[in-house]
Image (cartoon, rainbow, N blue to C red):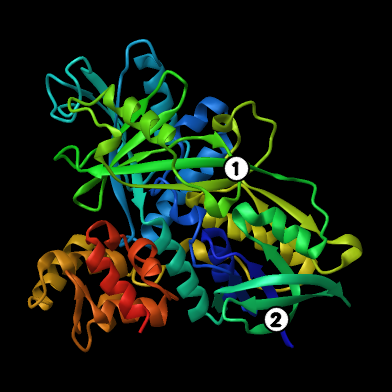
Amino acid sequence: MSEIDLLIIGGGVNGAGIARDAAGRGLSVLLCERHDLAGATSSASSKLVHGGLRYLEQYEFRLVHESLAEREVLLAAAPHVIWPLRFVLPVHKGLRPPWMLRIGLFLYDHIGGRRSLPGTKTVRRTSSKRLDPLQDSYRLGFEYSDCWADDARLTALCARDAADRGAEILVGWEATAAQRDGGAWIVDLRSDAGETRQVRARGVVNAAGPWVGEALKLSGARADHAPRLVKGSHIVVRRLHDGDQAFTFQNDDGRIAFVIPYEHDFTLIGTTDIPYGGDPAAVHADDDEVAYLCELVSEYLKTPITPTDVVWRYSGVRPLYDDGGVSASTVTRDYVFDIDAPDGEAPMLSIFGGKLTTHRKLAEHALEKLQPLMDFKGEPWTAKAILPGGDIPDFDAFADAQVRKHSSLPERVVRRLCRAYGTKIDPILADGPGREIAPGVFEAELRHMRDHEWARTGEDALWRRSKLGLHLNEAERAAVTGWFGR
């Protein structure tokens, strides 16, 4: 039986972020994930690091402030997988009036300590082309800043950094039983290949996302909270406009939808907010949600879209803290910790809620809660730390240099590798790209995903470590899957 300081159940962005922070403080850490890193909610987001503009209407000022401050921290830590994006919010007659939008955006610009991103400006059809993709009736809007993020790659980078600092990352392993014994947790682990392990941990973090309740049951730990599961779905269509701007569209049900340039050739649209009571592993974007998103954005666009235009759809379940909100849209996205540590026994900290943007701060707060219970040393350190591959002062200059350096490869491939791996592109291509397994997909990259990022299947590589699956046909995707199945 191995003895460790901290066992983390769940390889989403929160679990990986906590593993990274804890390992950097000198704790012995083991993270177990029964499927794949970012295999559920953490790869099913809107791909944004943002403050959550609409949360201002729900008086979530602390959450928005923290999220906007984190936006700056994460942008500096991972400029290869997070970068600035300008959003255009058109004024819709009959919905929120211009003065209300402008006040909200003024707050959005100022309550988070914005430093590097440009502020809000007014756009008019008569003097700007930013509204050109929209119907002529939309003549006024506001342009503001947020950031795009590759959610699944951000999760993998946190796990990679945790491993580089000494953490053990077990993908394809689940916790099957847990019980307290002499001031520690004894946890049984089983791999999907049938192997078993037992570990003794001074503390446990339950970062199982939608399965947080399931992890509590296997341990018999007490819980003061229960998750409220909310389903969010997205659709992807062929690129809708030539500009680099994203859009934020209001709807008369109080919701908003994002329309985001995605993977060069596509547009990402989302999201929905629907109460969910099924198996999180079986969640999918249903036809009603697809129709809802198509109708919402078609009210704005010159060229409407229909469900037949959708080339990919995905859905995730958010394990939100049940604060008694009337609708799924108004349930807080803030995170809540549930700590079970009776009479000074080994603690289990369970996480409810949270969002991609706040994962680093959540990890810092989680360790702050665990520190007096586990009596470990180590101060917060991640606020100024760079994630693997992120040591890039000027991304455009870096990418241009890499294109020149690897001139034997198509420029688009090199720039994609720069975005995915940052400065890690050099060790990946040190011995050449290797055999081309599918168009633009070389063996050296797949080997890196397998050996350094815990990718075990073609699906892991095509839909989480990358979104190459969008760009390849069925036979080409099968070739990648076959490479992993050798």
* Residue 93 higher or lower than 397, as above or below: above
Residue 218: percent from the left, percent from the top? 76, 64
* Residue 225 higher or lower than 110, as above or below: below
Q: Which residue lies furthest to the top in this view?
A: 94
**Kind of residue sitting beneath label 1:** Asp
* Residue 18 higher or lower than 138, as above or below: below
**Kind of residue sitting beneath label 2:** Ile
Q: How far is the residue under mark 2 from the one under mark 1? A: 30 Å
Residue under numbered circle 1: 334
> Which residue is pictured at 30% across the width and 35% down the height?
307
Q: Determine crowd level at label 2: few under 14, some 14-19, many 20+ residues with C-alpha closer than 10 A.
A: some
Q: Confirm or deny contact between disc 2 and disc 1 (CB under 8 A).
A: no
Residue under numbered circle 2: 4
Q: Which of 81/316 is in front?
A: 316
Sequence order check, earlier mark of 2 and 1: 2
In the displayed structure, does residue 11 sit left or right of residue 372? left
> Which residue is pictured at 54% across the width and 70% down the height?
20
Q: Residue furthest right?
A: 343
> Which residue is pictured at 12% across the width and 19% down the height?
126
Q: Which secondary structure lies at badge 1?
A: loop
Residue 110 appears in which quarter of the rendering? top left
Q: Determine crowd level at label 1: few under 14, some 14-19, many 20+ residues with C-alpha closer than 10 A.
A: some
> Which residue is pictured at 61% across the width and 52% down the height?
210
Image quarter (top left, top right, bottom left or bottom right) of the N terminus: bottom right
Residue 440: percent from the left, percent from the top? 18, 69
Residue 16: percent from the left, percent from the top? 54, 66
Residue 406 appears in which quarter of the rendering? bottom left
Q: Residue 5 carries which label?
A: none
